[in-house]
Image (spheres, rainbow, N blue to C red):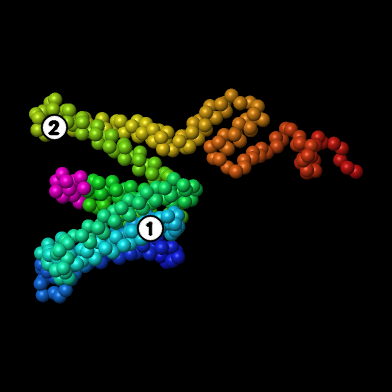
């Protein structure tokens, strides 16, 4: 949709390239499994496995381009152009080195590389190692470019960068969880794998929202709620695990299953502290990350307290305009009060207003 609505923006075409790379890799690996392992009579099975081998360096290169060019399709400054060239050349070098490396395929170990060059055995892994090293440096530089662009941005541009940063942060957390689970158990649970896939999908979706500017300012509330409920989940999970562990050690055996009443008591304790913990975490997040909203809420609360003691209309009007200017920050602010029927209008009123508030007199002949 982004390429159709904004064909002049390279961001949409880069995401289309990334999606095409993932689609080609998924299709070729499935075909290779069927053609090599299930039904060897099918043709081009080793070639399909070979295509799966080298498709991911160009995908990383396209992602690096996105970070360098987001959101307006232009570099932060001409000084970043060498990083763009480094990403392109490194991804191509890594893809060529992997594609021509002889021996077994790393993505499909039962197949020999049908296009492997014997001359590459003299320097095994040089091209792909150099290419991946350059691509990693380019990716780090692209991330630094995105951070620097965010620090310099204001207004709409800052909200756009928040969207892509939010999606990239979710994907980074999912990838870290997947790596930790793989190092701990040798595999990743299906839930974590699903989160990794959702994070990958969220990046182009967030970029589309940012570029199309649809509900752009909703990102502040989304980030706020994610931080609050993420901290709340971690706190309640730790409280529940600690209560169950302590109850099991005190009233059960070490290594035995905790008694059912300990589990029930921990559940009730978590339910009891949910609302107070949520309010405290929300207040802490607002003070730390959303100071403007916190200050505005405090200003309105203080004004509502002082409002009970105000009888002077002029002082109340001045303070109300000051509170509105401090919290909402409009360019101009004015207050209109309808005239009271028991008082005449100001001398500058219209003839109709003066006639309306004039005392009754003799009728005209």
**Is residue 182 in the magenta section?**
yes
* Furthest residue toward right: 365
Query: Which is nearer the eye, 146 or 77?
Result: 77
What's drawn in magenta, residue-wise?
Answer: 179-191
Q: Hey, which quadrant is residue 95 in on the image?
A: bottom left
Return the mark for residue 352. Answer: none
Q: Where is residue 209 in the image (x, y as percent from the top left)?
A: 41, 55
Query: Which is nearer the eye, 47 or 231?
Result: 47
Instruction: Identify the image quadrant of the C terminus.
Output: top right
User: What residue does disc 1 label?
Assistant: 82
SS at circle 1: helix
Instruction: Identify the image quadrant of the N terminus.
Output: bottom left
Q: In this view, does 206 lie to the left or right of 335?
A: left
Q: Is residue 62 visible?
A: no
Residue at 41% over, 38% down: 289
Residue at 40% over, 60% down: 11
Q: Is residue 158 above or below residue 78?
A: above
User: What residue does disc 2 label?
Assistant: 258
Q: Where is residue 156 in the image (x, y as percent from the top left)?
A: 48, 50
Q: Can residue 158 be seen in this view?
A: yes
Q: Hey, which quadrant is residue 44 in on the image?
A: bottom left
Q: In this view, does 341 lie to the left or right of 188?
A: right
Q: In this view, does 329 lie above or below 28?
A: above
Q: Which of marks 2 and 1 is in front?
A: 1
Q: Position of residue 48 (x, y in %)?
A: 19, 69
Residue at 36% over, 60% down: 85
Number of numbered markers? 2
């Amino acid at each position: 949709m982004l390429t159709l609505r904004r064909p002049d923006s390279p961001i949409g075409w880069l995401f289309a390239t990334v999606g095409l790379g993932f689609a080609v890799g998924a299709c070729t690996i499935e075909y290779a499994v069927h053609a090599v392992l299930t039904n060897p009579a099918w043709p081009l099975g080793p070639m399909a496995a070979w295509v799966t081998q080298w498709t991911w360096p160009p995908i990383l290169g396209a992602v690096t381009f996105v970070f360098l060019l987001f959101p307006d399709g232009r570099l932060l400054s001409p000084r970043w152009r060498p990083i763009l060239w480094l990403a392109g050349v490194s991804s191509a070098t890594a893809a060529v080195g992997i594609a021509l490396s002889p021996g077994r395929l790393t993505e499909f170990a039962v197949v020999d590389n049908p296009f492997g060059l014997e001359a590459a055995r003299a320097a095994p892994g040089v091209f792909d190692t150099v290419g991946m090293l350059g691509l990693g440096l380019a990716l780090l530089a692209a991330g630094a470019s995105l951070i620097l662009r965010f620090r310099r941005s204001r207004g709409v541009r800052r909200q756009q960068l928040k969207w892509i940063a939010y999606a990239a942060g979710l994907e980074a957390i999912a990838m870290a969880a997947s790596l930790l689970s793989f190092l701990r158990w040798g595999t990743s649970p299906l839930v974590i794998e699903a989160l990794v896939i959702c994070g990958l999908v969220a990046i182009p979706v967030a970029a589309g929202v940012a570029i199309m500017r649809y509900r752009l300012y909703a990102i502040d509330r989304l980030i706020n709620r994610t931080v609050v409920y993420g901290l709340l989940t971690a706190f309640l999970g730790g409280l529940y695990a600690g209560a169950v562990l302590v109850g099991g050690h005190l009233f059960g055996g070490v290594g035995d299953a905790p008694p059912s009443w300990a589990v029930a008591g921990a559940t009730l304790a978590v339910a009891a502290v949910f609302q107070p913990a949520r309010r405290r975490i929300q207040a802490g997040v607002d003070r730390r990350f959303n100071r403007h909203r916190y200050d505005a809420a405090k200003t309105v609360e203080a004004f509502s307290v002082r409002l009970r003691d105000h009888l002077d209309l002029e002082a109340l009007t001045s303070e109300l305009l000051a509170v509105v200017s401090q919290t909402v920050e409009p360019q101009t602010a004015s207050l209109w009060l309808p005239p009271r029927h028991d008082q005449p209008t100001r001398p500058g009123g219209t003839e109709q207003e003066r006639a309306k508030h004039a005392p009754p007199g003799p009728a005209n002949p």
